[in-house]
Amino acid sequence: MRIDTKDLVTTVAYMIGVKKDNIIKYYEEECRELLDKLFKSKEATIIRYLSKLRTTLFLRYKKTDSELRFNITNLDKIEWYDKDNIKQLQEWGIPVLQPNYTSDMYMEHFANLIAENIDACEHLFEDWIKFEYIKDLFVIPRQGKKNVLKAEFETFMKFYKFYPFQMYIHWSPRDCGNILYNDEKFVGVLYGQHGELFTDTSKVKDATDETKDNIYEFINSGHKVAIAVDCENSDVFKLYGVLKNLNQEELDKIEKIMLFDDSHTSTAWEWLGKFTKIPVEYIQVQRVTDAKSLVDIQMTAGVCTAYYKDNIDSFIVCSSDSDFWGLISSLPDANFLVMYEYTKCGKAIKEAMAEKGVVNCSVDDFCTGNATELKRAVLLDQLESYGNKLVGMNGKDLARQVYVDTRITYVEADVENFYNKYVKSIRLKMDEEGVFRIEIAR
């Protein structure tokens, strides 16, 4: 069983200007750390304040226009506008206040300011989500053309109750409940607005509290705990997703991660140590013949050594290969928790773990949406390795080949995103010594 994530909708709710009380009510329990980050983000807060101003202008359009025209005043003197927000924007160099403006002029002004500042928020979203779709919620196409903004204003007022928390966004409003209820619902609506179907629920689902509590209990009950990984039969990004979705306070109790790797696996394993605070011991297992892997044997020997020599009594084993059962059987006094992948772990071994009372869970239950930083680093490193071989290559073929080279599982949407965001950004840049280097936007 899995639960819905709310990281994406929390970010969007903050940026469109949802009242702080509602943000805390609906999102703080699951996303407290994220909210702290958003409250401190200048880029997100600029869009938040501008979005609030735009929604207020839509709701008080005529009254605002009367104040501006007949009382010869400005927004910071009109009671229904947040003066503190306006003051902060002005201090940040966002020219909100303009002399002798009407409501129409401010409507276009706010639209332009949002369009000018929205790109600075791209880093707040993971690579798997199409930022151009997020951007489309804030930027009105052809907003400078006659009657475009007027039409948006009329649509908002007519279908006001269909907008999330009654805050303006650019979309085709319809009655589908709160689209910011959770990430899965939101991306379904978001992609649907662009004629696409979003199906990768691993990005928007996470393990239940019960699953996580079982892991915490295992860690706390051990004297010394280590993670042992069969890299041949594990997915580095799914494991990283597990680590990212567990409390760092509990993870700090883990002595080390032992990676037993083979030359035929993803190069991403070599990067894991740079993205986790847990010490990583990387063991590259050599093959005697190309057809025979010795990872299982080396892992068994390594875990036994850690048990008898390093006094590690509890092991979190990451593998979906039934050969790990021999390891567990060889150390009857040690404690084991097994993390496996659903499609790679057979029914018999699951029944054996249940019979022997071996704690286990699936890495597939954990959200992989926040594993982007590791995946990005691996892919860009591989892309940069092409150097002068880039000349004459087709960009989309290159993007696909990078995934193949790194042995990262992908769908065509992943390749398309990587191509648009990184491959298309490749430029030649001369360094201080006059040597041309490949530069990729990050």
Image (tube, rainbow, N blue to C red):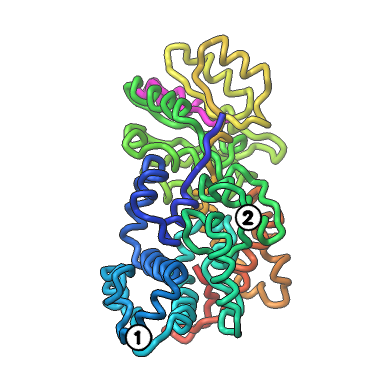
- Residue 341 placement, left or right of 309: right
Residue drawn at (38%, 23%), measured in percent from left and top? 217
Mark 1 — residue?
70
Seen at 37% across and 24% down, the residue is 312
**Residue with the most extreme top position:** 355
The residues tagged by marks 1 and 2 sit, at their Cα atoms, a distance apart of 37 Å
Outermost residue, bottom side: 100
Q: Which residues are magenta?
A: 300-319
State the image coordinates of residue 439 (x, y, percent, origin top left).
52, 75
Q: Does residue 91 appear to the left or right of 66 in the view shown? A: left
| 337 shown above or below 11 | above
Residue 41 in view here = yes
Q: Secondary structure at mark 2?
A: loop
Across and down, in percent, residue 71 comes to 31, 84
Residue pointed to by mark 2: 174
Residue 234 location (% of width, % of height): 59, 36
In front of the other: 412 or 100: 100
Marks 1 and 2 in Cβ contact (< 8 Å): no
Image position of 412 with respect to 311: above or below = below
Q: Quadrant of residue 306?
A: top left
Q: Earlier in the sequence, mark 1 or mark 2?
A: 1
- Residue type of the residue flagged with mark 2: Arg
Does the rendering let one see residue 378?
no
State which quadrant residue 364 falls in.
top right
Q: Residue at x 48, y 65 (%)?
A: 122
Q: Amino acid at mark 1?
A: Phe
